[in-house]
Amino acid sequence: MIGRVGGVIVRDRGPVTDRTQLFGAEWCGDCRRTRSWLRRHEVPFVEYDTDADPDVRSRAEELAGGRTNIPVVLTPDGTVLVEPTSVELASVLSTHGARRGRSGCR
């Protein structure tokens, strides 16, 4: 299913994983914000650098339905978020039970 949560495209077509995956680049401000949010809310995640590896960049584009925007976040249940806001991360990750630690999004 493809839908929208606010301005983010949500796709339920990624693979099921054991932890959240973040595809992004060091220079990207939205990627830094997403990384910081995941750490602050103690969400276990693996990060992949789209600049360092063309295969990673291709994987991020595939997950995002051909879009080249980053960050791309793949949740443990296979939901894909493209350029999510902090509120959208909180909504989707708490819905899927992926958040640990602190409750609420600030």
Image: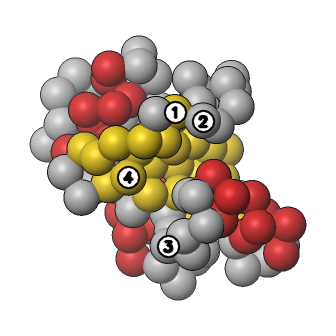
First along the sequence among labels 1 and 3: 1
Q: Which mark is residue 9?
A: 4
Q: Residue at x 56, y 23 (%)?
A: 77
35 left or right of 78?
left
Tag in front: 1 or 3: 1
- The amino acid marked with disc number 2 is Arg
Mark 3, residues whose alpha carbon is within 10 Å: few (<14), some, or many (≥20)? few
Q: Residue at x 70, y 31 (%)?
A: 15
Label 2 belongs to which residue?
13
Q: Are marks 4 and 3 in contact (CB under 8 Å)?
A: no
Mark 1, residues whose alpha carbon is within 10 Å: few (<14), some, or many (≥20)? some
Tell me where residue 44 appears, x and y as whole percent.
56, 32
Mark 2, residues whose alpha carbon is within 10 Å: few (<14), some, or many (≥20)? some
Quarter of the image for residue 54 reads: bottom right
Q: Is residue 20 visible to the viewer in this orientation of the structure?
A: no
Label 1 belongs to which residue?
12
- The amino acid marked with disc number 4 is Ile
- The amino acid marked with disc number 1 is Asp
| Distance from Cα at disc 1 to Cα at disc 3 | 18 Å
72 left or right of 93?
right
Q: Nearer the viewer, residue 32 or 68?
A: 68
Label 3 belongs to which residue?
69
Q: Secondary structure at mark 3?
A: loop
What number of labels is visible?
4
Given the current orientation, which residue lies at the most extreme top position?
A: 97
Work out whether 17 lies above or below 30: above
Q: Are marks 2 and 1 in contact (CB under 8 Å)?
A: yes
| Distance from Cα at disc 4 to Cα at disc 3 | 11 Å
Q: Are marks 1 and 3 in contact (CB under 8 Å)?
A: no
Quarter of the image for residue 45 reads: top right
Q: Secondary structure at mark 1?
A: strand
Quadrant containing the C terminus is: top left
